[in-house]
Image (cartoon, rainbow, N blue to C red):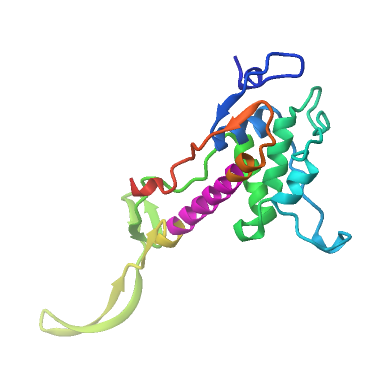
Amino acid sequence: MTMQGKIGRPGGPKTKRALGVQAALEWAFGVEKAQLELPPPTDVTEEGFGFGLEYVLMQRGALGCKIDGGQHKMGGYVHEDAEAIAATVAGIPDSLGGIRMAIRVTELARAGLTPDWMPGVVPRCVPVETRQNQHGIRAVTEVVGTERVLTRGKWRTVEVLACPVTWRPHPEQIASARRGYEDWWQALDWVRDGLVAGRMLRDMEVTAVMPKEMPWRL
């Protein structure tokens, strides 16, 4: 049975499912195909205020109004809980990445993915450039100076060669990937808190289960 079949439908048995926030997002965007409805820029609104969770709750029926469904899913009904989840994601505040983060959370959930924090990757010192010939792969060297050496009783000038090296992947690449994961985790934590506090889900209960906060530390 798919997750879609496990969520209560109008006219069917009301079985409240308990899901962690990541699983709930994957159901909403991956199974139900809910769409991210981003609010318009604040400078085109009547009062010029930002769209926080309070606005999302008010607009999406947390005060007792029914959430409209079926607007986006091709050939079927979009569960109102999925639309409520999508609306909450759209309200991610600027301090946590705002619209960019909302889009990232949506795309990852729709694909059923977790951000790549580069698990098991260790920077290695490697040549900047290599060349391959009949003898195999060799590091490219460059002349960095000259020296006078005594060879067979004669002084000769010889080139001093060095092999430029670098770190791959660069430690900053790894750090950046892990900062991106932490930002995503913080956004999911905000969405989870909003869904729990808003009490706007009718057939689903979002639990305290979260992805590991810093899996690279384990």
Query: Residue 180: x and y, percent?
Result: 52, 54
Q: In terms of image quadrants, where is residue 48?
A: bottom right
Q: Is residue 114 above or below residue 33?
A: below
Residue that appears at 76% across and 50% down: 55
Query: Residue 54: x and y, percent?
Result: 72, 50
Where is the N terminus found, in terms of image quarters? top right
Count of all numbered marks drawn on residues in the image: 0
* Extreme residue toward the front, this view: 64
Query: Residue 70: x and y, percent?
Result: 82, 28
What segment is highlighted magenta in the picture?
174-192
Q: Is residue 92 above or below residue 210?
A: below
Residue that appears at 63% across and 57% down: 97
Where is the C terminus found, in terms of image quarters? top left
Query: Residue 155: x and y, percent?
Result: 17, 86
Q: In terms of image quadrants, where is residue 174?
A: bottom left
In the rendered view, does 170 fall on the left or right side of 155?
right
Dominant secondary-structure state across the stretch colored magenta: helix
Q: Is residue 27 above or below residue 102?
A: above
Residue that appears at 54% across and 51% down: 186
* Extreme residue toward the left, this view: 153
* Extreme residue toward the right, this view: 46
Q: Is residue 215 above or below residue 69?
A: below
Q: Nearer the viewer, residue 137 or 119?
A: 119
Q: Can residue 60 be found in the magenta stretch?
A: no
Q: In terms of image quadrants, where is residue 152?
A: bottom left
In the rendered view, does 98 fall on the left or right side of 213?
right
